[in-house]
Protein backbone atom coordinates (compact mmCIF):
# COMPACT_ATOMS: atom_id res chain seq x y z
CA UNK A 1 0.00 0.00 0.00
CA UNK A 2 1.23 3.51 -0.64
CA UNK A 3 2.48 5.90 2.07
CA UNK A 4 -0.58 7.63 3.47
CA UNK A 5 -2.89 4.80 2.44
CA UNK A 6 -1.70 2.48 5.15
CA UNK A 7 -3.60 1.65 8.21
CA UNK A 8 -3.91 -1.07 10.60
CA UNK A 9 -5.84 -1.82 13.60
CA UNK A 10 -5.70 -4.13 16.35
CA UNK A 11 -8.57 -5.86 17.95
CA UNK A 12 -9.31 -6.65 21.44
CA UNK A 13 -12.11 -7.90 23.38
CA UNK A 14 -14.61 -6.61 25.77
CA UNK A 15 -18.22 -7.33 25.29
CA UNK A 16 -21.76 -6.94 26.33
CA UNK A 17 -23.46 -10.22 26.97
CA UNK A 18 -26.71 -10.60 28.85
CA UNK A 19 -26.46 -6.88 29.56
CA UNK A 20 -23.05 -7.19 31.26
CA UNK A 21 -19.68 -5.92 30.08
CA UNK A 22 -17.50 -9.00 29.68
CA UNK A 23 -13.74 -9.22 29.32
CA UNK A 24 -12.64 -9.13 25.70
CA UNK A 25 -11.42 -12.70 25.70
CA UNK A 26 -14.89 -13.91 26.60
CA UNK A 27 -16.15 -12.95 23.15
CA UNK A 28 -13.63 -15.05 21.23
CA UNK A 29 -14.03 -18.72 20.46
CA UNK A 30 -12.91 -20.68 23.49
CA UNK A 31 -9.72 -22.73 23.01
CA UNK A 32 -9.83 -26.50 23.03
CA UNK A 33 -8.12 -28.45 25.81
CA UNK A 34 -5.26 -29.23 23.45
CA UNK A 35 -4.89 -25.53 22.59
CA UNK A 36 -4.74 -24.74 26.31
CA UNK A 37 -2.06 -27.40 26.84
CA UNK A 38 -0.03 -26.12 23.91
CA UNK A 39 -0.33 -22.52 25.08
CA UNK A 40 0.74 -23.48 28.58
CA UNK A 41 4.04 -24.84 27.35
CA UNK A 42 4.87 -22.85 24.24
CA UNK A 43 4.20 -19.40 25.67
CA UNK A 44 6.85 -19.92 28.35
CA UNK A 45 9.55 -21.61 26.27
CA UNK A 46 13.03 -20.07 26.08
CA UNK A 47 14.75 -19.00 22.87
CA UNK A 48 17.79 -16.91 21.98
CA UNK A 49 18.16 -15.03 18.72
CA UNK A 50 21.25 -14.67 16.52
CA UNK A 51 22.37 -11.60 18.49
CA UNK A 52 22.32 -13.51 21.76
CA UNK A 53 19.12 -11.83 23.00
CA UNK A 54 17.29 -14.31 25.20
CA UNK A 55 13.51 -14.15 25.54
CA UNK A 56 12.41 -12.77 28.90
CA UNK A 57 11.31 -15.17 31.61
CA UNK A 58 8.26 -15.22 33.86
CA UNK A 59 10.39 -13.76 36.64
CA UNK A 60 11.04 -10.72 34.43
CA UNK A 61 7.56 -10.07 33.02
CA UNK A 62 5.10 -11.52 35.55
CA UNK A 63 1.86 -13.43 35.13
CA UNK A 64 -0.33 -13.35 32.03
CA UNK A 65 -2.64 -10.35 31.73
CA UNK A 66 -5.92 -11.19 30.02
CA UNK A 67 -6.82 -7.53 29.45
CA UNK A 68 -4.06 -6.81 26.94
CA UNK A 69 -4.02 -7.62 23.23
CA UNK A 70 -1.67 -7.49 20.30
CA UNK A 71 -2.62 -7.01 16.65
CA UNK A 72 -0.32 -7.38 13.67
CA UNK A 73 -0.63 -5.81 10.22
CA UNK A 74 -0.83 -8.61 7.65
CA UNK A 75 -0.86 -8.47 3.83
CA UNK A 76 -2.94 -10.76 1.63
CA UNK A 77 -2.13 -9.10 -1.67
CA UNK A 78 0.74 -11.27 -2.89
CA UNK A 79 -1.39 -13.71 -4.89
CA UNK A 80 -2.95 -10.93 -6.91
CA UNK A 81 0.39 -9.37 -7.83
CA UNK A 82 2.04 -12.78 -8.29
CA UNK A 83 -0.30 -13.44 -11.21
CA UNK A 84 0.97 -10.33 -12.98
CA UNK A 85 4.75 -10.56 -12.88
CA UNK A 86 7.89 -12.35 -11.85
CA UNK A 87 9.40 -11.21 -8.53
CA UNK A 88 11.62 -8.15 -8.94
CA UNK A 89 14.01 -7.83 -5.97
CA UNK A 90 15.36 -4.28 -5.67
CA UNK A 91 18.25 -5.30 -3.41
CA UNK A 92 19.51 -7.91 -5.88
CA UNK A 93 18.92 -5.56 -8.81
CA UNK A 94 20.89 -2.66 -7.32
CA UNK A 95 23.86 -4.89 -6.57
CA UNK A 96 24.25 -5.25 -10.33
CA UNK A 97 23.00 -1.78 -11.33
CA UNK A 98 23.84 0.60 -8.45
CA UNK A 99 23.55 3.76 -10.57
CA UNK A 100 19.97 2.97 -11.57
CA UNK A 101 18.65 4.23 -8.25
CA UNK A 102 19.34 7.79 -9.44
CA UNK A 103 17.47 7.47 -12.72
CA UNK A 104 13.82 6.49 -12.98
CA UNK A 105 14.24 5.97 -16.74
CA UNK A 106 17.41 3.87 -16.62
CA UNK A 107 16.85 1.04 -19.15
CA UNK A 108 18.12 -1.47 -16.62
CA UNK A 109 14.83 -1.14 -14.73
CA UNK A 110 13.07 -2.71 -17.70
CA UNK A 111 10.29 -0.16 -17.60
CA UNK A 112 7.77 0.61 -14.87
CA UNK A 113 6.71 -2.47 -12.93
CA UNK A 114 3.67 -2.92 -10.75
CA UNK A 115 5.62 -3.73 -7.64
CA UNK A 116 9.07 -4.57 -6.27
CA UNK A 117 10.36 -6.73 -3.41
CA UNK A 118 12.86 -5.13 -1.02
CA UNK A 119 14.30 -8.56 -0.15
CA UNK A 120 13.52 -12.26 -0.22
CA UNK A 121 11.27 -13.84 2.43
CA UNK A 122 12.59 -16.95 4.17
CA UNK A 123 9.81 -18.95 2.50
CA UNK A 124 10.62 -17.52 -0.93
CA UNK A 125 8.54 -15.21 -3.11
CA UNK A 126 5.28 -16.84 -2.13
CA UNK A 127 1.60 -16.40 -2.87
CA UNK A 128 -0.88 -15.83 -0.05
CA UNK A 129 -2.76 -18.94 -1.17
CA UNK A 130 0.23 -21.22 -0.47
CA UNK A 131 -1.17 -23.53 2.23
CA UNK A 132 2.32 -24.53 3.37
CA UNK A 133 3.27 -20.90 4.06
CA UNK A 134 -0.06 -20.10 5.71
CA UNK A 135 0.36 -23.04 8.07
CA UNK A 136 3.84 -21.76 8.97
CA UNK A 137 2.36 -18.32 9.68
CA UNK A 138 -0.41 -19.82 11.80
CA UNK A 139 2.10 -21.56 14.06
CA UNK A 140 4.67 -18.76 14.18
CA UNK A 141 2.15 -16.05 15.05
CA UNK A 142 0.34 -18.30 17.49
CA UNK A 143 3.59 -19.04 19.30
CA UNK A 144 4.40 -15.33 19.32
CA UNK A 145 1.25 -14.44 21.25
CA UNK A 146 -0.35 -12.36 18.48
CA UNK A 147 -4.09 -12.10 19.17
CA UNK A 148 -5.27 -10.83 15.80
CA UNK A 149 -3.89 -10.26 12.33
CA UNK A 150 -5.32 -7.24 10.56
CA UNK A 151 -5.63 -7.52 6.79
CA UNK A 152 -4.60 -4.50 4.72
CA UNK A 153 -7.55 -3.52 2.54
CA UNK A 154 -6.76 0.19 2.40
CA UNK A 155 -6.31 0.31 -1.37
CA UNK A 156 -9.56 1.17 -3.13
CA UNK A 157 -12.18 -1.54 -2.77
CA UNK A 158 -9.79 -4.49 -3.02
CA UNK A 159 -10.29 -7.19 -0.37
CA UNK A 160 -8.02 -9.90 -1.83
CA UNK A 161 -10.85 -12.35 -1.13
CA UNK A 162 -9.18 -15.45 -2.54
CA UNK A 163 -6.21 -14.98 -0.23
CA UNK A 164 -8.00 -14.19 3.02
CA UNK A 165 -10.48 -17.03 2.50
CA UNK A 166 -7.62 -19.49 1.96
CA UNK A 167 -5.96 -18.22 5.12
CA UNK A 168 -9.18 -18.76 7.07
CA UNK A 169 -9.38 -22.30 5.72
CA UNK A 170 -5.80 -23.11 6.73
CA UNK A 171 -6.08 -21.43 10.14
CA UNK A 172 -9.27 -23.38 10.85
CA UNK A 173 -7.51 -26.67 10.13
CA UNK A 174 -4.53 -25.56 12.21
CA UNK A 175 -6.85 -24.97 15.15
CA UNK A 176 -8.19 -28.49 14.80
CA UNK A 177 -4.56 -29.59 15.06
CA UNK A 178 -4.11 -27.63 18.29
CA UNK A 179 -2.58 -24.40 17.01
CA UNK A 180 -3.69 -21.28 18.87
CA UNK A 181 -3.89 -19.13 15.75
CA UNK A 182 -4.58 -15.39 15.82
CA UNK A 183 -8.08 -14.08 15.12
CA UNK A 184 -8.72 -11.95 12.02
CA UNK A 185 -9.88 -8.39 11.33
CA UNK A 186 -9.70 -5.90 8.47
CA UNK A 187 -8.50 -2.34 8.01
CA UNK A 188 -10.05 -0.37 5.17
CA UNK A 189 -9.62 3.09 3.66
CA UNK A 190 -8.67 6.02 5.89
CA UNK A 191 -11.70 7.99 4.76
CA UNK A 192 -15.40 7.20 4.13
CA UNK A 193 -14.92 6.84 0.38
CA UNK A 194 -17.27 5.12 -2.09
CA UNK A 195 -14.61 2.41 -2.55
CA UNK A 196 -14.51 1.81 1.18
CA UNK A 197 -18.29 1.54 1.44
CA UNK A 198 -18.34 -1.00 -1.38
CA UNK A 199 -15.58 -3.01 0.26
CA UNK A 200 -17.24 -3.04 3.69
CA UNK A 201 -20.55 -4.09 2.18
CA UNK A 202 -18.91 -6.85 0.17
CA UNK A 203 -16.95 -8.04 3.20
CA UNK A 204 -20.08 -8.13 5.32
CA UNK A 205 -22.03 -10.07 2.69
CA UNK A 206 -19.32 -12.62 1.85
CA UNK A 207 -17.87 -13.30 5.32
CA UNK A 208 -19.77 -11.88 8.27
CA UNK A 209 -23.44 -12.14 7.32
CA UNK A 210 -23.20 -15.85 6.36
CA UNK A 211 -21.10 -16.41 9.54
CA UNK A 212 -18.18 -17.95 7.69
CA UNK A 213 -15.18 -18.77 9.88
CA UNK A 214 -16.90 -17.12 12.83
CA UNK A 215 -14.47 -18.70 15.31
CA UNK A 216 -11.72 -16.59 13.74
CA UNK A 217 -13.44 -13.20 14.08
CA UNK A 218 -11.86 -10.75 16.47
CA UNK A 219 -14.30 -8.99 18.80
CA UNK A 220 -13.89 -5.59 20.39
CA UNK A 221 -16.43 -4.10 22.76
CA UNK A 222 -18.78 -6.98 22.07
CA UNK A 223 -18.78 -6.86 18.27
CA UNK A 224 -16.46 -7.86 15.43
CA UNK A 225 -13.77 -5.23 15.02
CA UNK A 226 -13.30 -3.39 11.75
CA UNK A 227 -10.93 -0.48 11.19
CA UNK A 228 -13.08 1.66 8.99
CA UNK A 229 -15.62 4.50 8.89
CA UNK A 230 -19.31 3.69 9.25
CA UNK A 231 -20.59 6.64 7.20
CA UNK A 232 -23.42 5.94 4.73
CA UNK A 233 -23.58 2.23 5.48
CA UNK A 234 -26.80 0.33 6.03
CA UNK A 235 -28.11 0.30 9.62
CA UNK A 236 -27.61 -3.47 9.63
CA UNK A 237 -23.88 -3.12 8.96
CA UNK A 238 -23.47 -0.10 11.24
CA UNK A 239 -24.91 -2.09 14.11
CA UNK A 240 -22.88 -5.23 13.41
CA UNK A 241 -19.29 -4.00 13.87
CA UNK A 242 -17.26 -2.03 16.36
CA UNK A 243 -15.83 0.66 14.09
CA UNK A 244 -12.40 2.13 14.73
CA UNK A 245 -11.40 4.31 11.75
CA UNK A 246 -7.71 4.35 10.95
CA UNK A 247 -5.68 7.52 11.40
CA UNK A 248 -3.45 7.77 8.31
CA UNK A 249 -0.80 10.26 9.43
CA UNK A 250 2.37 9.50 11.38
CA UNK A 251 2.14 12.30 13.92
CA UNK A 252 -0.49 14.48 15.51
CA UNK A 253 -2.50 11.69 17.04
CA UNK A 254 -6.25 11.04 16.86
CA UNK A 255 -8.57 13.55 15.25
CA UNK A 256 -11.48 12.12 17.21
CA UNK A 257 -11.95 9.64 20.05
CA UNK A 258 -12.83 6.72 17.78
CA UNK A 259 -9.73 6.49 15.64
CA UNK A 260 -6.89 4.02 16.04
CA UNK A 261 -3.35 4.49 14.79
CA UNK A 262 -1.48 2.03 12.60
CA UNK A 263 1.97 3.65 12.34
CA UNK A 264 3.53 6.73 13.89
CA UNK A 265 6.91 8.28 14.57
CA UNK A 266 8.21 8.25 18.14
CA UNK A 267 6.73 9.05 20.62
CA UNK A 268 3.52 7.43 19.42
CA UNK A 269 0.15 8.75 20.55
CA UNK A 270 -2.46 6.86 22.49
CA UNK A 271 -5.85 6.36 20.84
CA UNK A 272 -9.38 6.29 22.32
CA UNK A 273 -8.89 7.71 25.78
CA UNK A 274 -10.73 5.80 28.49
CA UNK A 275 -12.52 7.37 31.44
CA UNK A 276 -9.60 6.53 33.74
CA UNK A 277 -7.11 8.29 31.48
CA UNK A 278 -5.69 5.11 29.95
CA UNK A 279 -5.79 4.35 26.23
CA UNK A 280 -7.40 1.65 24.16
CA UNK A 281 -4.70 1.48 21.51
CA UNK A 282 -1.22 2.51 20.44
CA UNK A 283 0.75 1.65 17.27
CA UNK A 284 4.26 0.20 17.28
CA UNK A 285 6.26 0.21 14.04
CA UNK A 286 9.48 -1.28 12.75
CA UNK A 287 10.33 1.73 10.54
CA UNK A 288 8.58 4.77 9.04
CA UNK A 289 8.68 6.41 5.60
CA UNK A 290 9.18 9.79 7.22
CA UNK A 291 12.09 12.18 7.63
CA UNK A 292 12.79 15.11 9.93
CA UNK A 293 13.29 17.37 6.91
CA UNK A 294 10.33 16.37 4.72
CA UNK A 295 7.84 14.67 6.96
CA UNK A 296 6.06 11.99 4.94
CA UNK A 297 8.38 10.78 2.21
CA UNK A 298 9.55 7.68 0.39
CA UNK A 299 11.54 4.97 2.10
CA UNK A 300 14.53 5.58 -0.19
CA UNK A 301 14.58 9.30 0.62
CA UNK A 302 17.59 10.76 2.47
CA UNK A 303 17.10 10.61 6.23
CA UNK A 304 14.02 8.38 6.22
CA UNK A 305 13.43 6.59 9.51
CA UNK A 306 14.67 3.07 8.83
CA UNK A 307 15.17 0.11 11.12
CA UNK A 308 18.29 1.64 12.71
CA UNK A 309 16.89 5.13 13.36
CA UNK A 310 15.89 6.30 16.83
CA UNK A 311 14.50 9.59 18.06
CA UNK A 312 17.17 9.59 20.76
CA UNK A 313 20.28 8.96 18.66
CA UNK A 314 19.26 9.45 15.03
CA UNK A 315 20.51 7.04 12.37
CA UNK A 316 22.99 4.50 13.69
CA UNK A 317 26.23 4.43 11.67
CA UNK A 318 26.82 0.76 12.46
CA UNK A 319 26.18 -1.60 9.52
CA UNK A 320 25.14 -4.28 12.03
CA UNK A 321 22.40 -2.07 13.48
CA UNK A 322 19.88 -3.02 10.80
CA UNK A 323 19.44 -6.41 12.46
CA UNK A 324 19.11 -5.00 15.97
CA UNK A 325 15.67 -3.38 15.68
CA UNK A 326 16.59 -0.07 17.32
CA UNK A 327 13.59 1.84 15.92
CA UNK A 328 11.26 -1.03 16.75
CA UNK A 329 12.54 -1.28 20.33
CA UNK A 330 12.29 2.45 21.00
CA UNK A 331 8.64 2.33 19.98
CA UNK A 332 8.02 -0.76 22.10
CA UNK A 333 9.65 0.85 25.13
CA UNK A 334 7.32 3.82 24.84
CA UNK A 335 4.24 1.63 24.39
CA UNK A 336 5.17 -0.50 27.39
CA UNK A 337 5.33 2.62 29.56
CA UNK A 338 1.93 3.86 28.37
CA UNK A 339 0.43 0.35 28.64
CA UNK A 340 -2.64 0.61 26.37
CA UNK A 341 -5.14 -2.22 26.08
CA UNK A 342 -4.15 -2.93 22.51
CA UNK A 343 -0.88 -2.62 20.60
CA UNK A 344 -1.01 -2.56 16.80
CA UNK A 345 2.26 -3.70 15.18
CA UNK A 346 3.28 -2.76 11.64
CA UNK A 347 3.96 -5.17 10.20
CA UNK A 348 4.43 -8.83 9.19
CA UNK A 349 4.70 -9.47 5.45
CA UNK A 350 4.28 -6.43 3.23
CA UNK A 351 7.54 -7.00 1.31
CA UNK A 352 6.67 -4.97 -1.81
CA UNK A 353 6.25 -1.40 -3.01
CA UNK A 354 5.64 0.47 -6.22
CA UNK A 355 8.17 2.77 -7.93
CA UNK A 356 7.23 6.33 -8.94
CA UNK A 357 9.03 9.00 -10.92
CA UNK A 358 8.29 11.47 -8.11
CA UNK A 359 6.53 10.91 -4.79
CA UNK A 360 6.56 13.19 -1.75
CA UNK A 361 9.63 15.13 -2.97
CA UNK A 362 11.60 11.98 -3.77
CA UNK A 363 12.57 11.14 -7.37
CA UNK A 364 12.53 7.47 -8.39
CA UNK A 365 10.58 6.83 -5.22
CA UNK A 366 9.75 3.61 -3.39
CA UNK A 367 7.08 4.80 -0.92
CA UNK A 368 6.81 2.02 1.66
CA UNK A 369 9.59 -0.56 1.20
CA UNK A 370 13.03 -0.24 -0.35
CA UNK A 371 15.88 -2.18 1.28
CA UNK A 372 16.71 -4.26 4.31
CA UNK A 373 17.30 -1.09 6.33
CA UNK A 374 14.42 0.86 4.80
CA UNK A 375 11.62 -1.66 5.29
CA UNK A 376 9.24 -2.72 8.05
CA UNK A 377 8.58 -6.45 7.81
CA UNK A 378 8.97 -8.75 10.80
CA UNK A 379 8.55 -12.01 8.91
CA UNK A 380 11.97 -13.72 8.68
CA UNK A 381 14.03 -12.99 5.59
CA UNK A 382 16.47 -15.17 3.71
CA UNK A 383 19.93 -14.04 4.82
CA UNK A 384 20.29 -10.56 6.29
CA UNK A 385 18.80 -10.22 9.77
CA UNK A 386 17.06 -13.59 9.47
CA UNK A 387 14.52 -14.10 12.25
CA UNK A 388 15.80 -11.40 14.65
CA UNK A 389 12.66 -9.27 14.43
CA UNK A 390 10.37 -12.23 15.00
CA UNK A 391 11.97 -13.03 18.35
CA UNK A 392 12.26 -9.35 19.25
CA UNK A 393 8.50 -9.10 18.73
CA UNK A 394 7.93 -12.14 20.93
CA UNK A 395 10.12 -10.70 23.68
CA UNK A 396 8.11 -7.48 23.77
CA UNK A 397 4.75 -9.22 23.56
CA UNK A 398 5.78 -11.16 26.67
CA UNK A 399 6.74 -7.92 28.41
CA UNK A 400 3.36 -6.46 27.47
CA UNK A 401 1.10 -9.44 28.16
CA UNK A 402 3.05 -11.46 30.73
CA UNK A 403 3.48 -15.22 30.48
CA UNK A 404 2.95 -18.50 32.36
CA UNK A 405 5.59 -19.74 34.74
CA UNK A 406 8.06 -22.32 33.50
CA UNK A 407 6.93 -25.21 35.66
CA UNK A 408 8.23 -27.17 38.61
CA UNK A 409 11.45 -29.14 38.91
CA UNK A 410 11.18 -32.85 38.12
CA UNK A 411 12.53 -35.22 40.79
CA UNK A 412 14.56 -38.27 39.88
CA UNK A 413 12.34 -41.31 39.43
CA UNK A 414 12.94 -44.57 41.24
CA UNK A 415 10.72 -46.49 38.84
CA UNK A 416 11.96 -48.61 35.99
CA UNK A 417 11.83 -46.50 32.84
CA UNK A 418 10.07 -48.77 30.35
CA UNK A 419 7.20 -48.23 27.93
CA UNK A 420 4.64 -48.50 30.72
CA UNK A 421 6.46 -45.81 32.70
CA UNK A 422 5.80 -43.12 30.09
CA UNK A 423 2.03 -43.52 30.37
CA UNK A 424 2.26 -42.03 33.84
CA UNK A 425 4.43 -39.06 32.88
CA UNK A 426 2.15 -36.04 32.78
CA UNK A 427 4.72 -33.32 32.14
CA UNK A 428 4.65 -33.83 28.39
CA UNK A 429 5.39 -31.02 25.97
CA UNK A 430 2.79 -30.88 23.22
CA UNK A 431 3.84 -30.12 19.66
CA UNK A 432 1.60 -29.16 16.76
CA UNK A 433 0.39 -32.08 14.71
CA UNK A 434 -0.46 -31.94 11.03
CA UNK A 435 2.44 -29.68 10.06
CA UNK A 436 4.43 -32.09 7.90
CA UNK A 437 2.29 -31.28 4.87
CA UNK A 438 4.23 -31.06 1.63
CA UNK A 439 4.50 -27.81 -0.28
CA UNK A 440 3.22 -27.64 -3.84
CA UNK A 441 2.15 -24.19 -4.95
CA UNK A 442 2.64 -21.61 -7.64
CA UNK A 443 4.97 -18.85 -6.52
CA UNK A 444 5.19 -15.51 -8.24
CA UNK A 445 4.87 -15.75 -12.00
CA UNK A 446 7.37 -18.16 -13.48
CA UNK A 447 8.11 -20.09 -10.29
CA UNK A 448 6.75 -23.17 -8.56
CA UNK A 449 7.40 -23.80 -4.86
CA UNK A 450 7.88 -27.32 -3.49
CA UNK A 451 9.01 -28.82 -0.19
CA UNK A 452 8.57 -32.52 0.51
CA UNK A 453 10.74 -32.77 3.63
CA UNK A 454 7.83 -33.29 6.03
CA UNK A 455 8.20 -36.87 7.27
CA UNK A 456 7.73 -37.74 10.96
CA UNK A 457 5.03 -35.57 12.54
CA UNK A 458 6.29 -34.84 16.08
CA UNK A 459 3.36 -34.40 18.47
CA UNK A 460 4.57 -34.86 22.06
CA UNK A 461 7.88 -34.87 23.91
CA UNK A 462 8.48 -36.11 27.44
CA UNK A 463 11.57 -36.24 29.60
CA UNK A 464 12.53 -38.01 32.83
CA UNK A 465 15.63 -38.82 34.82
CA UNK A 466 16.86 -41.17 37.50
CA UNK A 467 20.12 -41.25 39.41
CA UNK A 468 22.18 -42.28 36.41
CA UNK A 469 20.38 -41.33 33.19
CA UNK A 470 18.26 -38.75 31.43
CA UNK A 471 15.52 -40.21 29.22
CA UNK A 472 14.10 -38.37 26.22
CA UNK A 473 10.77 -39.56 24.78
CA UNK A 474 9.21 -38.40 21.53
CA UNK A 475 5.89 -39.45 20.02
CA UNK A 476 4.80 -38.98 16.41
CA UNK A 477 1.35 -38.93 14.85
CA UNK A 478 2.10 -42.10 12.86
CA UNK A 479 4.69 -44.86 12.80
CA UNK A 480 8.21 -43.45 12.83
CA UNK A 481 10.21 -43.94 9.64
CA UNK A 482 13.28 -46.16 9.30
CA UNK A 483 16.30 -45.22 11.44
CA UNK A 484 18.35 -45.48 8.27
CA UNK A 485 16.68 -42.39 6.84
CA UNK A 486 18.92 -39.35 6.57
CA UNK A 487 18.76 -36.68 9.30
CA UNK A 488 16.55 -39.03 11.31
CA UNK A 489 14.98 -37.97 14.61
CA UNK A 490 17.79 -35.79 15.91
CA UNK A 491 17.95 -34.66 19.52
CA UNK A 492 19.72 -31.40 20.37
CA UNK A 493 20.71 -30.67 23.99
CA UNK A 494 21.81 -27.35 25.49
CA UNK A 495 23.35 -28.49 28.75
CA UNK A 496 24.40 -25.08 30.12
CA UNK A 497 21.56 -22.95 28.68
CA UNK A 498 24.09 -20.57 27.14
CA UNK A 499 23.75 -19.54 23.50
CA UNK A 500 27.43 -18.66 23.17
CA UNK A 501 28.57 -22.26 23.65
CA UNK A 502 28.06 -25.04 21.13
CA UNK A 503 26.14 -24.70 17.89
CA UNK A 504 23.43 -22.09 18.49
CA UNK A 505 23.72 -23.06 22.15
CA UNK A 506 23.41 -26.82 21.62
CA UNK A 507 26.28 -28.69 23.27
CA UNK A 508 25.26 -32.23 22.31
CA UNK A 509 23.54 -33.92 19.39
CA UNK A 510 22.14 -37.43 19.01
CA UNK A 511 21.55 -39.02 15.58
CA UNK A 512 23.55 -36.57 13.49
CA UNK A 513 24.63 -39.83 11.89
CA UNK A 514 21.98 -42.49 11.39
CA UNK A 515 21.92 -45.06 14.22
CA UNK A 516 22.68 -48.74 13.74
CA UNK A 517 22.19 -52.01 15.62
CA UNK A 518 20.04 -50.43 18.31
CA UNK A 519 22.65 -47.82 19.16
CA UNK A 520 22.55 -44.08 18.57
CA UNK A 521 25.62 -41.86 18.52
CA UNK A 522 26.00 -39.08 21.08
CA UNK A 523 28.30 -36.29 19.92
CA UNK A 524 29.54 -33.16 21.65
CA UNK A 525 30.10 -29.84 19.98
CA UNK A 526 33.81 -29.22 19.54
CA UNK A 527 33.35 -25.46 20.05
CA UNK A 528 35.92 -24.83 17.35
CA UNK A 529 34.33 -22.17 15.21
CA UNK A 530 33.67 -22.79 11.54
CA UNK A 531 34.48 -19.97 9.08
CA UNK A 532 30.85 -18.85 9.30
CA UNK A 533 31.03 -18.78 13.09
CA UNK A 534 28.22 -21.30 13.46
CA UNK A 535 30.32 -24.08 15.06
CA UNK A 536 28.64 -27.03 13.34
CA UNK A 537 31.53 -29.23 14.43
CA UNK A 538 30.91 -32.39 16.45
CA UNK A 539 33.09 -35.05 18.04
CA UNK A 540 32.15 -38.55 19.07
CA UNK A 541 31.32 -39.18 22.72
CA UNK A 542 29.82 -42.67 22.81
CA UNK A 543 27.12 -44.90 21.43
CA UNK A 544 23.99 -44.91 23.57
CA UNK A 545 20.83 -47.03 23.53
CA UNK A 546 17.63 -46.01 21.83
CA UNK A 547 14.26 -47.75 21.85
CA UNK A 548 11.82 -47.57 18.95
CA UNK A 549 8.27 -48.89 19.06
CA UNK A 550 5.77 -47.84 16.40
CA UNK A 551 5.27 -44.09 16.74
CA UNK A 552 7.40 -43.73 19.88
CA UNK A 553 11.14 -43.29 20.39
CA UNK A 554 13.17 -43.12 23.61
CA UNK A 555 16.82 -42.17 23.95
CA UNK A 556 18.69 -42.86 27.19
CA UNK A 557 21.81 -40.81 28.01
CA UNK A 558 24.04 -41.32 31.07
CA UNK A 559 24.17 -38.13 33.11
CA UNK A 560 27.93 -38.29 33.43
CA UNK A 561 28.30 -38.01 29.65
CA UNK A 562 26.37 -34.74 29.78
CA UNK A 563 28.37 -33.45 32.73
CA UNK A 564 25.42 -33.69 35.13
CA UNK A 565 26.12 -34.41 38.79
CA UNK A 566 23.45 -36.89 39.86
CA UNK A 567 23.29 -35.48 43.38
CA UNK A 568 22.59 -31.88 42.35
CA UNK A 569 19.83 -29.92 40.70
CA UNK A 570 20.31 -29.20 37.02
CA UNK A 571 18.65 -27.44 34.11
CA UNK A 572 18.91 -28.27 30.44
CA UNK A 573 17.12 -27.33 27.23
CA UNK A 574 16.40 -29.66 24.34
CA UNK A 575 14.83 -29.91 20.91
CA UNK A 576 13.82 -32.67 18.50
CA UNK A 577 14.30 -32.25 14.75
CA UNK A 578 13.51 -34.63 11.91
CA UNK A 579 14.81 -34.36 8.34
CA UNK A 580 17.03 -31.30 8.62
CA UNK A 581 18.32 -30.28 5.18
CA UNK A 582 20.81 -27.45 5.76
CA UNK A 583 23.16 -28.49 8.53
CA UNK A 584 24.56 -25.53 10.41
CA UNK A 585 21.69 -23.22 9.41
CA UNK A 586 19.21 -22.75 12.24
CA UNK A 587 16.70 -21.22 9.82
CA UNK A 588 16.20 -24.81 8.67
CA UNK A 589 14.14 -25.33 11.84
CA UNK A 590 11.48 -23.04 10.35
CA UNK A 591 11.58 -24.49 6.86
CA UNK A 592 12.27 -28.23 6.61
CA UNK A 593 11.02 -31.45 8.16
CA UNK A 594 9.48 -31.06 11.60
CA UNK A 595 10.85 -29.76 14.88
CA UNK A 596 9.57 -29.76 18.43
CA UNK A 597 9.33 -27.04 19.52
CA UNK A 598 9.20 -24.54 16.64
CA UNK A 599 12.21 -22.57 15.42
CA UNK A 600 14.66 -21.47 18.10
CA UNK A 601 12.38 -22.43 20.99
CA UNK A 602 13.51 -25.18 23.36
CA UNK A 603 11.84 -27.44 25.88
CA UNK A 604 13.21 -27.31 29.42
CA UNK A 605 14.00 -29.96 32.00
CA UNK A 606 14.64 -28.75 35.53
CA UNK A 607 15.82 -31.79 37.44
CA UNK A 608 16.41 -32.39 41.11
CA UNK A 609 17.70 -35.45 43.00
Image: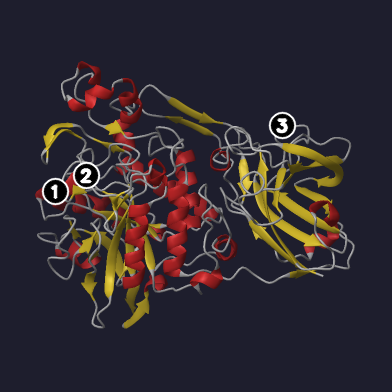
Q: Nearer the viewer, residue 248 or 318?
A: 318
Under tag 3, what secondary structure?
loop
Residue 73 in view, yes or no: yes
Image coordinates of residue 192 in percent, x first then y, are 11, 55
Looking at the rendered image, the disc whose residue lies closer to the viewer, 1 or 3, is 1
Q: Position of residue 588 (x, y in %)?
A: 57, 38
- Which corner quadrant of the image does residue 81 belong to? top left
Q: Is residue 287 above or below residue 570?
A: above
- Residue tagged by mark 1? 293
Cα–Cα gap, marks 3 and 2 = 50 Å
Work out which quarter of the rendered image holds the N terminus and state it.
top left
State the CA–CA distance, disc 2 to disc 1.
8 Å
Q: Position of residue 350 (x, y in %)?
A: 32, 43
Please name whichever residue, 400 or 125, is drawn nearer the observer in this view of the structure.
400
Residue 367 pos. (x, y %)? 20, 40
- Name, please, the residue furthest toward the top: 107
Q: Identify the mark nearer the N-term, 3 or 2.
A: 2
Give how far apart the Cα atoms at labels 1 and 3 are: 57 Å
Q: Residues within 10 Å of mark 1 (few under 14, many from 20)?
A: few
Residue position for label 3:
486
The label on residue 132 is none
**CB under 8 Å between callouts 2 and 1?**
yes
Q: Residue at left 43%, top 73%? A: 66
| Mark in the foreground, 3 or 2 | 2
Residue drawn at 80 percent across, 59 percent down: 564
**In the rendered image, the vertical position of residue 579 relative to residue 547, given as above or below:** above
Seen in the image, is 51 located left or right of residue 318?
right
Amino acid sequence: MNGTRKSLLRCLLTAFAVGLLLPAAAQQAQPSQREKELHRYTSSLPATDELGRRLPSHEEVGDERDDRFVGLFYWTWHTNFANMMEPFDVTKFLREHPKAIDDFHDPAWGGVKVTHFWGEPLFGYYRDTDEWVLRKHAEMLGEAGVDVIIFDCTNGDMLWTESYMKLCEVFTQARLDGVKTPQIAFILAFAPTPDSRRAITQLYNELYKPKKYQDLWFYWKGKPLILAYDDDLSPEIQDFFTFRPGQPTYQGGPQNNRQWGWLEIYPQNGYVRNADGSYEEMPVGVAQNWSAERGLTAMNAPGSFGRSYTHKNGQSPSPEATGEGLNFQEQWDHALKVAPEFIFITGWNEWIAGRYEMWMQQPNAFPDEFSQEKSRDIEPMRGGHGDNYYYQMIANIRRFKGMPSEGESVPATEEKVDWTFWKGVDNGFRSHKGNTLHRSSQGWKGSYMTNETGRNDLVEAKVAHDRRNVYFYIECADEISSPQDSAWMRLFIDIDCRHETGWEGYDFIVNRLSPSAGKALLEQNSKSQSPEGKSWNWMRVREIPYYLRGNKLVISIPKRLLGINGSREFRLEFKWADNMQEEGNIADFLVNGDVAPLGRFNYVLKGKP
